[in-house]
Image (cartoon, coloured by chain):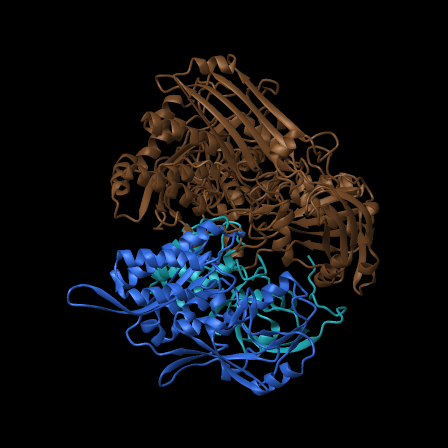
Amino acid sequence: MLRNFKVLTPSSLNETLYVINSLKEPYRFLCGGTDVLVRLKDNPNYTKVLVDISRLSELSKIEEHKSTYIIGATAKHLQVLAYEPFKKNYAAITDAVSVIGSPQIRALGTIGGNIGNASPAGDSIAALMAFDAEIETRSVDSNRKIMLSDFFLGPGKTVLAPNEIITKIIIPKFENYRSAWMRLGQRKGMAISKVSAAVSLHYEKHSNGSLKLNDIKIALGSVAPRVIRAVKTEKFMLLKQTINKNMINEATEMLLAEVSPITDVRSDEKYRRAMCGELFREIIEKLVLK
Amino acid sequence: MRKSKELEMRGKKESLYSVVGKTVDKIDAYDKIAGIAKYVDDLSFDGMLHAKMVYSKIPSGKILSINKKKALELPGVEAVLTADDITGLNKIGCVVDDQPLFAKEYVRFVGEQIALVVASTRRIAEQGAELVEIAYEQYEPVLTVEESFDEKKKVHPKGNTLCHYKVRKGENIDDAFKKSFKVFEKTFTINYQEHLYLETQGCIGVPAGNDGVTVYASIQCPFYVQGAVSTTLGIPLSQARVVQCAVGGGFGGKEDVPSEYAAKAALAAFILKKPVKLILDRGEDLMISSKRHPMKMEYKVGITKKGRINALKVKVLGDCGAYTTMSTIVLFRTSVHFGGPYVIPNVCGDIVGLYTNKVPCSAYRGFGTPQVIYAMESMINIICNEMGYDPFEFRKNNAVKKGALTVSSHKIKESCGLIETIDKAKKESDYDKRRKEFEKWNADATRKTFKGLGVSSIFYGMNLGAKGWFMDKAGSHVQIWKDGSVTLCVGNVDMGQGALTVLAQIASEALGCEITAINFKNVDTNIIPDSGPTVASRTTVMSGNAILDAANKLRQKLIAQASEMLKIKPAQVMAKHNKFYNIKDSRNAVTFQEVVKKCYMENIGLSEMGFYVSPKTDYNLETGQGEPYYVYSYATSVSEVEVDRRTGETRVNKITSVHDVGQVVNPALCAAQVEGGAAQGLGYAIMENLVSEKGYIKSLGLSTYTAPTVMDMPEVKSFFVEEKSKDGPYGAKGLGEPSLMPIVAAVANGISNACGHQFGHVPVLPEKIWEALESKRNSENKSEVK
Amino acid sequence: MPFKNFSEENAKPFETVAVKFKVNDEDISLNVPCHYTLLDILRYELRLTGSKEGCGMGECGACTVIMDGDIVASCLVLCTSLTGKKVLTIEGIKSDEKAKPIIDAFIKATAVQCGFCTPGMVVSSYALLKKHKNPTNEQIMEGLSGNLCRCTGYVRIVDAIHEAAKELNK
């Protein structure tokens, strides 16, 4: 049961920055509560202080700017799913967010929370990473922008300083990119991903029927201590450029070598590694060969 | 998943009865929908305290010391109870006296209860429980059935074998196999299953005067709890009262286990003289409450040239956990059902129950049979595939029927619709057509999945059986009030299966009143004598017959009164749909209410107790021969599954089940049982994997122990065959467990047939399916390269 | 059976917070320990026991209520997040005329067994039918994907929603 903590409710972003800067004890942010409260119920010593940021309206909007989309850190998953521009051009993001937890969780949970929780299986993370998402953070004395792919140190660990908060997720605008996110879970509904993959790419079809790859970003979940970009595989594919069965096979081999999955209560290392490749293959087929 | 189809047999026998055999709305549905029904945690009492249990953190060891000081110093903590505080006896074992209420000297599994912290709020109790300090001397735990069988390490000093059932039938089994045309052998293993009732275990103990306690709880057997409270508190049964609350699911998990918690809460209430509520949270429930027995099953089956099974040798090692609980009875059922509903002249069976230092296993829907059904039906699948037999023809060829002998040499005298279920399952599943389609599909290399069909047939002994006869009784109370409303009370529990509705239908039929006149009282040991547990699919028969006993006495009185009022002979009176009328002239009628009012005015008492005892049968435990149960229900199920060739993920697309349950009392409720059983069965077959390492359960949440969601459900078609049983109310048998029992085997066979590989372990997880498919692909590639 | 408000007068050192929000259209103003969730407040302060705790971790749906128009897991809503919110529980929904077809359909379809998941199912169905007047099978399954049931196999619950939709569209 929940117990043993106190809740601080700053009424503005500035007040929040001030509060977390002056706190002497460790704290956690509370917004949707779908990760933090679960952890607290499991382990009453998880934190003694919660800083409730759920009412900070300046952090909860999704906006379009000239060359980016900006998702406020406390925007709920439901908001992201309802945002029209994402439905059209960022399929991977809506693919991923639409299966987080359940409808009851998606109405509470936030994108910033999903990122801050830093799970190696974090569903929205791989999808955002496949769009070169950046994280904006603030503290009383700093204002940083960090690539999502550089944001994590390990399971549950980010580069956030003790007095820092995620404020925005910045997604560059992409023209004519196709994307998808897929995962395997223990069942069809309410599943934690065993392995997940997100790909965004840009290609063109030539008059002779050949397919030329212009850009590709591959992000993988649950196959390493943190969500990762498959950098070597991306480089390889961009070097080869021509997309065909051979190239996809070779790329898959490279991919399998870039991951380090583990065996745990949900699945085993061998299967995760192999499935990582299968998901990648299926996504490429879906995006390019159809 | 498509729209469910209604029962097949509608309209066939509707003229026979006015209420029985019809779909009638569940009488408790509205209260549950509106959130009005009271489950135990919805109740509150003045001055109520809250309790939390303190658990062993190690699987095996000696308790060196228990330090309550810090816990008692926490403001709000009122008491920390241990074995030394027990006012009666420190024993809670339901069948065998091997389990203490509170561990005193030794702990034998992670989660064994050592103390009870009682506090003003649940949170303080939880905090207090963390402050109780226990020092242990750790022992090496016994973690597998093989280790236990070895006896090198002991769970209990008397030895690790808690039971060994033998079946010896026919000639020496090795000689019998020599005469077989072909012999097939395989070893199967099957993991735990967790009940995962949506309402966790819970109870409230309330002091009743100075010498008694009333327990409110979520339970399947008030009488077990009453006995446990009496024994552990040291008070007579007459001072221990148990009242059942609405039960949010049981499935066997609330048969004997609630006594362990109820006795603790009752003890605290008795000592502190205040109400004490004890509710388990989900993590606790997953860790400490009983599970289905994992088993290792070695099967050897011999067939004749004509496709008849002539020899069967089976060895089962059941992982019972640290204490017996109901294991001796569970494994008794295993020893009766391991050969399936087939005629087998030569049988050698050894069913062994072994202690391990893990969570004690006990009752779960099917009670020791789904495991061996999986094994036996898998063997039949292997045989049919290798020999090219049609799976229905093979089963029919070997099936029991009237006049035939079961594996126990029980001569079937009545009520056996097995062959009909086999024929109907084949027809309704469109098996031949689908099989051809699937063969084509699987041969097509462009397809992304493999499709398969799986078949399974079962039988299941009704009620508590030859060795449980001493408990197999049921009471009822039927009271007709002067305004014509009726109150029923029985000793069996409605945990969602619809018992109350079915029993109301039986009462309504017998009394001639409308079903809307009937209300139920909660099961209360103050009202009804010991009626045994709500298990073994026995409620319709036991409580139904007990109600008929009372209702028929009342009916006679009512008819006598009506015959006077109508001025005709009693034999001419018909009672139906709230009217008592002349069978020759229905215009000459009086209403139920008028008859009742007249009885009241004439001082004719309209309150009767009913009692029913299950038929007695004989069984020889040495040879496993005799009549283990008085009658059996039968079923055949067919699954359609689809396996992803690349990921090994399984999708169950369709389940077709045909059940012989005798008289169907409520068609929709029967279909609902089959649908629920399909969900629990397919969950067990493909996705419910309880992970346990070194005696520690790792699956402690609903996202790690994954049961089916709405998105995982297949189309479920159910059909019923009505081979009436002479001892059942209106000829009814039971369905609660048979609805789940064939499904694991049917789904596992479907997967095996889709993949062309017989899987020997349940749950059949994608990881294992993928491994098998990969292995096949690699060896195919190798042979191609050659 | 006697009932009494469950509250934590003796509970120290937990801090208390003031909470002001709406439940079933009624203004609620309470002081509760800061670790209370919405589910705790509903069940133990307001004695609205229709919403159930099946897991406490947001994984079963038995605690489903509607908050500001969306279904949420009330066991994961901390009391400090409630200010200004509008909450609708089964107790409020059951008297709504739009809920009557749902309730009738659940009864007629034999969609209730042990009943523990049922209030949550009805709340999710109610929210679903407000959003989709004629839901497809896929929409129904998505809408119920966060509500676990161990008894029914879901078949009749889905049927009930189809029936209720038909009735509501008449």
Q: Position of residue C121 (x, y in %)?
A: 47, 59
| Residue B391 appears left or right of B272 | left
Q: Nearer the viewer, residue B617 or A223?
A: A223
Q: Residue at x 56, y 62 (%)?
A: C51
Q: Position of residue C98 (x, y in %)?
A: 42, 67
User: Which residue lies at the image location 70% right of the left edge and 34% below the top edge?
Assistant: B153
- The tint of chain A in the picture is blue
Q: Is residue B641 above or below residue C9?
A: above
Q: Residue B781 appears in which quarter of the rendering?
A: top left
Choose between B655 and B357: the one closer to the eye.
Answer: B357
Q: Is C72 or B544 nearer to us in this picture?
A: C72
Q: Residue at x 38, y 78 (%)?
A: A172
**Picture layout, residue B117 above or below residue B715:** below
On the picture, is C20 further left or further right than A107?
A: right
Q: Is residue B188 above or below residue B129?
A: above
Q: Which chain is brown?
A: B
Residue B747 shows in the view = yes
Residue at left offset 71%, top offset 34%: B154
Pick whichever, B264 or B241, lies toward us. B264
Give the chain ID for the cyan colour. C
**Image vertical order of residue C91 relative to residue B383, above or below:** below
Residue B126 placement (x, y as % from top left): 71, 59
Image quadrant in which the C terminus of chain B is located: top left
Is residue A178 rendered to the left or right of residue B363? Answer: left
Name, please, the residue furthest toward the left. Answer: A207
Left or right: B596, with B110 as reference point: left
Instruction: Report the number of numbered marks.
Output: 0
> Residue A246 location, x and y as percent?
28, 56
User: Looking at the image, can residue C27 be seen?
Assistant: no
